[in-house]
Amino acid sequence: MRNDNPAKEEALARKTVLVSDMSGKEIPEGKGATIRITYRDARKGVRELDVTDEEAEGLAAKGRSVARRGRRPKSAQT
C-alpha cells in the first residue's frame, strides 16, 4: 500500500562523486577536467575522460594551446 502522506516520508540527499578515469582518485567539487579525444577517423567516434587537475595539466603540457572560436566580445574589439 502506498503512503500518500508526504510528511512521513524521509528526504534523502544525493551526492554525485566524480572519479578520475586515469587514476581512480576522487575528483573534488569544482576541480577536475574533461579530456575529449577526437580521432581523425570519424568511425572511431569520440571519447571523454574525467581527470583531476594535476592529470590534466600533465597531459596539457605535452599539447598545444588552441584559440577560442567565435566572435570576440564587443569590449575586446577595436
Image (spheres, rainbow, N blue to C red):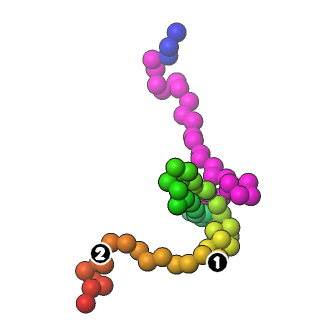
Identity of the residue drawn at 53% across and 56% down: 41
Find out whether residue 43 is within the magenta segment: no
Residue 61 — which label?
Answer: 1
Write the start and end of the magenta stretch as one range.
Answer: 4-29
- Residue 38 appears left or right of 52: left
- Residue 51 appears left or right of 66: right
Q: Which amino acid does label 2 sit on?
A: Arg
- Residue 63 appears left or right of 58: left
Quarter-of-image position of residue 25: bottom right
Q: Is residue 20 above or below residue 6?
A: below
User: Does residue 22 appear anywhere in the picture?
Assistant: yes
Majority secondary structure in the magenta region = loop
Residue 22 — which label?
Answer: none
Picture coordinates of residue 78, whole percent (x, y): 25, 90
Label 2, secondary structure: give it.
loop
Q: Is residue 3 above or below residue 22?
A: above
Residue closer to the observer: 26 or 51:
51
> Callout 2: few (<14), some (14-19), or many (20+) C-alpha neighbours within 10 Å?
few
Picture coordinates of residue 18, whole percent (x, y): 63, 52
> Callout 1: few (<14), some (14-19), or many (20+) C-alpha neighbours within 10 Å?
few
Identity of the residue drawn at 56% across and 51% down: 44
Q: What residue type is labelled 1?
A: Ala
Residue at mark 2 to residue at mark 1: CA–CA distance: 27 Å
Identity of the residue drawn at 55% across and 59% down: 39
Q: Name the residue under label 2.
A: 71
Quarter-of-image position of residue 68: bottom left
Furthest residue toward bottom:
78
Quarter-of-image position of residue 61: bottom right
